[in-house]
Amino acid sequence: MNYDDWKLMSPDDEGPQLVSPCCKGEYEEKDFITEMNEKYKCLECDELFMVPETDHEYDERQRENAAEDRMDEKRLGL
């Protein structure tokens, strides 16, 4: 890849990014594993989690949750 192509790339062109599943923030790997097998810590909200996920997986999960919430509101007549 030449410099001009690299310079014009967007972050999405590099492929999926790994993010924390709690808030899509950056995370760090801990030196230890907790009793619940949590090995990573979110730098945004300090949540512990077992496995990071791609930003695309996080976005899809959020869309599914929003759709489920809308369906629940319809069922309850809200």
Image (cartoon, helix red, strand yellow):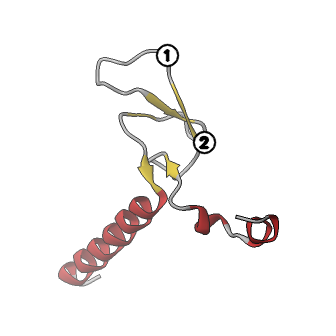
The residue that label 2 is drawn on is 44
Which type of secondary structure does the marked residue at label 2 adopt?
A: loop
> Is 53 placed left or right of 1 in the picture?
left
Q: Which one is closest to the eye, mark 1 or mark 2? A: 1
Q: What residue is rendered at 31% in x and 70% in y?
A: 64
Q: Residue at x 37, y 68 (%)?
A: 60
Most foreground residue, 69 or 65 = 65
Neighbour class for label 2 at 10 Å: few (<14), some, many (≥20)? Answer: few
Q: Which residue is mark 1?
A: 31
Q: Quadrant of the N terminus?
A: bottom right
Observer-nearest of 74 and 62: 62
Q: Position of residue 23 (x, y in %)?
A: 50, 51
Cα distance, mark 1 to mark 2? 19 Å
Relative to 18, 8 lies left or right:
right
Instruction: Answer with left or right where residue 11 lies relative to residue 75.
Output: right
Three-letter code, disc 2 = Glu
Observer-nearest of 13 and 47: 13
Front-most of residues 59 and 45? 59
In the image, what residue occupies the spot 44% across and 64% down?
56
Q: Which quarter shows the C terminus?
A: bottom left
Categorize mark 1 by other alpha carbons within 10 Å: few (<14), some (14-19), many (20+): few
The amino acid type found where label 1 is placed reads Asp
Residue 65: x and y in percent read: 32, 67
The spot of residue 19 in percent (x, y) is 51, 48
Question: In the rendered picture of this protein, how many numbered marks are placed on residues?
Answer: 2
